[in-house]
Amino acid sequence: MFRYLPDLISVFRLLAGFFLLILYDPLEPSRFGWALTLIVLAELSDHLDGRLARLMGTASMRGYILDGVADRAFYCALILLAFDYHRPHIVIVYLLIFGQVLVYAARLLQDNWYRKNTRVRFLHLLHWAGIRIWTLSFVVVDAAIVWKDFHLELDSLSWYLAMQSAVGFATIAVLYSAISLCVVEGLRSQN
């Protein structure tokens, strides 16, 4: 039973994205609180499943694929919530979601792609941080609304909205640069 624990943690994150879409409502404090708890647990699970599998000696291709699917599902749910409640530009939303698909394709097409190339690893870490900062910046605004820590005034939030767009576009640039490097490295390795 314990040997499947890392996979079960990934399945939790996979389901967390779905339930996040149902629970998330910044106008309902109790539902928002549960959604926030789910976000924190899913983020923790993202760091726990792979490490636990390697520590237990149960790392497998199934777990690798499941981890990737769970990551993409959870981040697509966060991106969709940002779009639903805050209406960032649809091009940002499309490029971030399509980028998630491309990252998963790169994972499948190149075995151990993350460790093969230090430039790709650096760009992947920047993307990893950028997608979290971009999506969680919307959650911060919603939390402030729920707990009424500040009053929303368009003038006072213009810098924040500009920062969100800048982080979104920077994340997209980093993501597509990493994917391009993966493609180039893949082509080089085939020749």
Image (cartoon, rainbow, N blue to C red):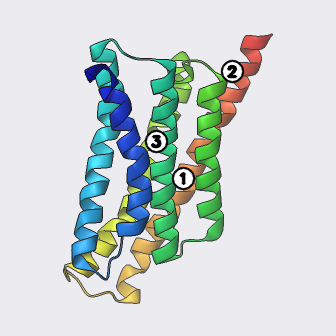
Q: Which mark is residue 179?
A: none
How many marks can you see? 3
Residue sitting farthest toward the right? 191
Instruction: State the image quarter where residue 91 is shown.
Output: bottom right
> Which callout, 1 or 3, points at the residue further toward the start of the chain?
3
Q: Quadrant of the C terminus?
A: top right
Residue that carries the numbered disc 2 in the rendered image: 185
Work out whether mark 2 precedes mark 3 in sequence or the reverse, and give the earlier one: 3
Depth order, front residue of 153/12: 12
Q: Is residue 39 left or right of residue 163?
A: left
Q: Nearer the viewer, mark 1 or mark 3?
A: 3
Q: Residue at x 44, y 57 (%)?
A: 18
- Gap in angstroms between the C-alphas marked 1 and 3: 24 Å
SS of the residue under disc 1: helix
- The secondary element bearing badge 2 is classed as helix
In the rendered view, would you say 100 is above or below 152? above
The location of residue 74, given as percent across then percent down, is: 45, 50
Which residue is rendered at x = 32% and y = 74% of the image? 142
Among the 4 quarters of the image, the one containing residue 185? top right
- Mark identifier at residue 170: 1
Q: The N terminus appears in which quarter of the rendering?
A: top left
Q: Which mark is residue 70?
A: 3
Where is residue 24 drawn, in percent x and y? 36, 69
